[in-house]
Image (tube, rainbow, N blue to C red):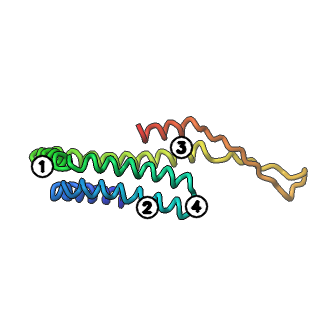
Amino acid sequence: LIAGAFSIIFSSLSLFVMSCCPKLLIKISLLFSLVCSLLVVMAAFAYGNIIAGMFGVVFFALSLCYACMVWKRIPFAAANLNTGLTAVKGNAGVIVVAYCIIVASYVYLCVWMVALVGVYDKEGLCDTTTTPANGSEGGTTTTCEANLSWGYFFLLLLSVFW
């Protein structure tokens, strides 16, 4: 329930932020990518992992080249983002459908988790048998045989991602 509420809150917040300052948002995302890449490089060298640091330097250089090449195209991207957001705001039905899909996917995930627990309870638990230990009547040993059917779990995994 908390995750569903947070997804609705963050999607509303992101729509608001994108409509307020699209050009700044695009610039911040480019710079954030560069800063994170540089932090990975510094962490790799700080931990003494030279190979990872060298790969990080290469990818940082590629990210820097990409940022330099697209920096002059930010106004065009911001105009495209504004056009798309204007279309979304003009047709509020799109927003309602998106929030309905969020709620439906949350309900589906809850039902899926109940099904997963049910399959595990039915198929994943052990069969226990109690037999007398060494022919004496005083002590017993319990053996457990797992009869896990991985096919059901694969199908459940497939159903949640497909």
Q: Earlier in the sequence, mark 3 or mark 2?
A: 2
**Residues under labels 3 and 2: Cα distance?**
44 Å
Asked if one can make out residue 18 in the rendered structure from this viewpoint, the answer is yes
Within-10-Å neighbours for mark 3: few <14, some 14–19, many 20+: some
- Above-or-below relation of 126 to 139: above
- The residue shown at (35%, 61%) is 2
Within-10-Å neighbours for mark 4: few <14, some 14–19, many 20+: few
In front: label 1 or label 3: 1
Residue 95 spot, x, y in % from top left: 18, 48
Question: Circle 1 is placed at which residue position?
Answer: 89
Which residue type carries mark 4? Gly
Residue 125 spot, x, y in % from top left: 63, 47
Q: Earlier in the sequence, mark 4 or mark 2?
A: 2
**Residues under labels 2 and 1: Cα distance?**
38 Å
Question: Circle 3 is placed at which residue position?
Answer: 119
Residue 78 spot, x, y in % from top left: 17, 49
Which residue type carries mark 2? Leu
